[in-house]
């Protein structure tokens, strides 16, 4: 096997609402692998049958959202006996589901913003009163801020619910925590430096993440070193709580008195030029090429070499 990896499929594109972002992530990873002499090829599950994966020795997952980050492709790769990057089936499915992630965290005493499940029969005004305004409304099973609304005015929850429900039938309303948004990258047992995200617009939405050039990313993040170390340790705990392995990202918010609240887990983080894990890795002295190779190495360490099925 060349470089110990053999023939690698870089899974990109897919069928989710994050397809365009996934194509960018996959292109960056593909270039980084090929630059290191690794035999890597792009593989778009939206245009090729999954059984074509059987010709590959390993898979680097750059799919985001449904069918790529929710355990679906992980299950297929398990069936074919192909080592793959990132978390397994269970952790991927839970991490994609913001509601179930928060239920696990709450049960374990891991801090997360207060929330309520919303449906068409909810008492919208009562939920607004309970959580306070502003609040966020989001589909439980989407990424990249798709379908998210910041509700600022009383009576606005219903319209926000209607928008979110277009993306997912499971919708949550979440307490606003507004003194800073941060993220923690994890690669193996290594927790990367925290990145603070400062969007120029109202919140860190899809546009701020992928299209604008005026979003600020601060690394060092500005937190006292002792506090940063504590949050890094707790982020790893939050990641492991849902079964997360290999690599991922945990987002958190800070309130006005310096208390942090974990927001969600990304089990297949972005790898674009705007992405946060490569940014944090660079701050830790890890090049993009080394980061990609490290993540692929973790796949082999976690799953072993390809096994034959059938």
Image (cartoon, rainbow, N blue to C red):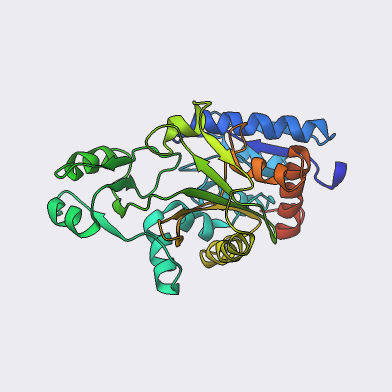
Which residue reaches farthest bottom? 108
| Viewer-nearest residue: 115 or 130 | 130
Q: Position of residue 106 (x, y in %)?
A: 40, 69
Residue 149: quarter of image = top left
Image height check: is 89 above or below 166? below
Please give left or right for residue 85 compared with residue 14 in the image.
right
Q: Position of residue 183 (x, y in %)?
A: 54, 50
Please give left or right for residue 103 compared with residue 236 in the image.
left
Decide if residue 48 is in sight here. Answer: no
Residue for point 44% across, 67% down: 105
Residue for point 71% across, 48% down: 295
Residue for point 29% across, 46% down: 137
Q: Position of residue 32 (x, y in %)?
A: 75, 33
Image height check: is 157 above or below 308? above
| Viewer-nearest residue: 114 or 81 | 114
Residue for point 79% across, 31% down: 34
Please give left or right for residue 301 compared with residue 20 in the image.
right
Q: Specify the quadrant that holds the N terminus.
A: top right
Residue 254: quarter of image = bottom left
Instruction: Tell how many labels.
Output: 0
Q: Position of residue 247 (x, y in %)?
A: 64, 53
Decide if residue 278 is in sight here. Answer: yes
């Amino acid at each position: 096997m060349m470089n110990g990896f053999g023939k690698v499929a870089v899974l990109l594109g897919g069928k989710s609402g994050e397809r365009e972002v996934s194509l960018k992530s996959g292109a960056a990873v593909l270039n980084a692998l090929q630059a290191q002499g690794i035999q890597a090829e792009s593989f778009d599950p939206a245009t090729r049958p999954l059984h074509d994966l059987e010709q590959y020795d390993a898979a680097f997952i750059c799919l985001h959202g449904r069918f790529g980050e929710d355990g679906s492709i992980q299950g297929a790769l398990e069936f074919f006996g192909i080592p793959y990057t990132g978390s397994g089936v269970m952790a991927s499915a839970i991490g994609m589901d913001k509601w179930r992630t928060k239920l696990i965290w709450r049960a374990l005493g891991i801090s997360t913003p207060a929330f309520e499940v919303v449906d068409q029969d909810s008492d919208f005004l009562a939920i607004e009163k309970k959580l306070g305004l502003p609040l966020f409304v989001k589909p439980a099973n989407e990424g990249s801020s798709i379908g998210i609304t910041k509700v600022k005015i009383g009576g606005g929850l219903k319209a926000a619910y209607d928008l979110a429900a277009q993306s997912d039938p499971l919708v949550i309303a979440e307490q606003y925590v507004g003194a800073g948004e941060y993220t923690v990258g994890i690669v193996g047992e290594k927790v990367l430096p925290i990145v603070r995200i400062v969007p120029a617009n109202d919140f860190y939405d899809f546009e701020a993440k992928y299209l604008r050039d005026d979003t600020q990313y601060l690394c060092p993040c500005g937190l006292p070193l002792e506090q940063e170390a504590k949050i890094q340790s707790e982020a790893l705990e939050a990641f492991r709580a849902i079964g997360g392995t290999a690599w991922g990202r945990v987002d958190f918010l800070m309130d006005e008195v310096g208390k942090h609240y974990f927001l969600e887990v990304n089990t297949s983080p972005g790898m674009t030029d705007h992405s946060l894990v490569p940014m944090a890795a660079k701050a830790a002295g890890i090049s993009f090429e080394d980061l990609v190779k490290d993540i692929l190495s973790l796949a082999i360490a976690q799953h072993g070499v390809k096994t034959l099925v059938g």
